[in-house]
Amino acid sequence: MLKTFKIGGVHPAENKLSAHKAVEQLPLPKTATIMVAQHIGAPSKVIVQRGDEVKVGQIIAQSAGFVSTNIHSSVSGKVMKIDTVVDSSGYKKNAIVINVVGDEWDESIDRSTELVTDTDLDAKAITDKILAAGIVGLGGATFPTHVKLSPPPGMKAEVLLINGVECEPYLTADHRLMLEKGDELMVGTKILMKALNVNRAAIGIENNKPDAIKHLKELAKKYEGIEICPLKVQYPQGGEKQLIKAVIGREVPSGALPIAVGAVVNNVGTALATYEAIIKNKPLIERIVTVTGKSVANPSNFMVRIGTPTSQLIEAAGGLPDDTAKIISGGPMMGKAVSNIEVPVTKGTSGILIIKEEEGHRKPMQNCIRCGRCVSVCPMGLEPFLLMTLSEKNTWDKSEEERVMDCIECGSCSYTCPANRPLLDHIRYGKMTVGGIIRTRK
Amino acid sequence: MSASLIYTIITISSIGITAAVILYFTARKFYVYEDPRIDDVEEALPAANCGGCGFAGCRAFAEAIVKDNSLDNKFCPVGGNDTMKSVANIMGLVAEQKAPRTAVVRCNGTCEHRPKTNQFEGATTCAIMSMSYGGDTACSYGCLGCGDCTTVCDFDAIHMNPETGLPEVDDDKCVACGACVDACPKSLIELRKQMPKHRKIYISCRNEDKGGPAKKACSVACIGCGKCEKECKFEAITIANNLAFIDSDKCKLCRKCAPVCPTNAIQELNFPPRKVKPVVEETTKEA
């Protein structure tokens, strides 16, 4: 019997169309648009000026606070402008636009592919270097990794979990990474273990990726303390709290962080970025992005420099099909439709999903029939129908009592609702408002 | 009359009398003194319970007035100066006179002026739409058209116009309670001084982008060129963040700013047609 989390969960069609496609390097863009806020927390402080020459890997925006991180240039060239550009949400955000000239890397970066299996840095030095390299959680939430590696006083990590679940349908970036960069991933995991001072790590992988499980199990023999944990396929297993429950059977209390049960979760992409930052001195300037969709001519996985426009990725995967209804940044469950095809890839972009016209629209909303399916699929044990009603009626005190802040926005409720009610839309609004109220209280 | 009926009457009456005695003494024991002026003030208020005064309802407003024994920063926009005068009489205070206000919607981005660039399929409230993304046009400052302002209005004073997709204020009904101002996530609704005959002249745009992108997104966007600012003799117009603003307290309704606007972003409402110039002459003489 395979492990999984116990409450709720759904199993949408997997549609992993690009699972067999090796990662290709995408050509450099003509201009790279690097957003200044690519992570959760304070936006970074820009330290370059218009007209400055930059190299690949040069720091262009500095961390502004503890929960913040550095941003590096992903290309070489000249800073064309520092201005607001429309991001994937349709709002204008600050960005650094760089005109790409050649591909000149910073001298400190080791570009060889030779595998180094150990580092002599201590825990503090590793954490500092991770901050310097601008590493954030690459699973999609983009939480700065150095914060996760610095447990609050009095708390101690016991186990490191590496998230190779990739429970979102369609996406295959992490799958390919595990297959192609297995050794680097293992070393990255060892480095993260050292930074946290733990001697146990587990890599959780859903068993719809048997090749990755087999490959990593083989490699794990060489690396002490790392176990591979195959998991039953169930969405949202990639959620931090669900993964902890599935792998080590502990439940994170409401409102607490995973560190409260002695666990720290990092994505496989983050582990690889850690390896590259510590061993090769390479900051986070590129990531794997899956470009996929049923109508896409050539669903692929690309290694993409941060700041590349989405349109270039779609072009590389065979162009935008005529019957496209939506372009989603991320997976179909948690991703967000983009309102502009020129939006740049950021550190959190895990996939570009193109949805056809016939599948691309919501069905008309009907009245709630009180079937309770949303309650039974909620992986956090909430009552989505109730939270939606409370949010509609602006009863925020009651919303807070009903633990709206525990919602992980996985979308299982909206996915499963037979009356097509926009549960998650309302719950998100409730979370935003209640979050604001809680912050003013402090 | 049967005996059982008599017993029943006696029993029930004695229960009633005992209860009355208990209730009388309990009421005396737990009597809470309440200033009778609270009731009087509440009586004088319009009982709309809209929250336009900033309190939870008319009763809460009356309690606050009596408790503070002052009328500073307390104004009932629904009742206006007349109501405040009668409240002041009850309290023996002097009410501050305020010019009546009315709501205006500062967006003129109809489908014609502001073409849609995408389609929104989420829950149809402005609050959620605004949280999710910039909106279904290239202008992320403009009206989203889901009508949050109309649902919060207690006075039936604001309606969506299906042709333009924008809300319109009914001046006769609007009491300037400010519910729609709070409901609009884009802060498009502004309370302005009520002018004679409900005449209004205002910048019908909140777009803070530079001229080029603003004009591209919406043909009637304010581009912050400053022509109206130069034209205004009363210093009523200021430009900040690529956006003009007409201060309704300084504006004399001379209408000179509107013709110079290159994008027709200045909206004139309830004025007689141009060429007939009584308004212009009157106000310039006064000035």
Image (tube, coloured by chain):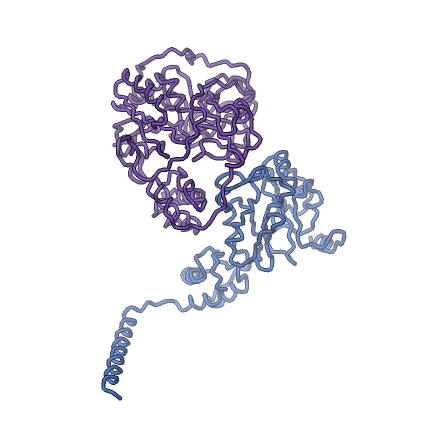
Chain colours: A purple, B blue
Residue A187 place in picture, x, y as percent: 33, 17
Q: Is residue A336 left or right of residue B247?
A: left
Quadrant of residue A194 in the image? top left
Residue A383 place in picture, x, y as percent: 36, 46
The count of marks equals 0
Q: Is residue B125 left or right of residue A117?
A: right
Quadrant of residue A382 in the image? top left
What's the residue at 40%, 45% (across, down)? A434
Viewer-side residue, A113 vs B94: A113
Task: Look at the image and tell me whether residue A434 can be seen.
Answer: yes
Q: Quadrant of the N terminus of chain B?
A: bottom left
Residue A76 place in picture, x, y as percent: 51, 17
What's the residue at 25%, 87% (across, down)? B2
Question: Considering only vertical position in the picture, is B127 above or below A31?
Answer: below
Residue B28 place in picture, x, y as percent: 29, 72
Question: Considering only vertical position in the picture, is A348 above or below B174?
Answer: above
Task: Look at the image and tell me whether residue A49 can be seen.
Answer: no
Quadrant of residue A31 in the image? top right
Question: Considering only vertical position in the picture, is B92 above or below B254?
Answer: below
Q: Is residue A97 left or right of residue A71?
A: right
Q: Residue furthest bottom?
A: B1
What's the residue at 57%, 54% (across, down)? B158
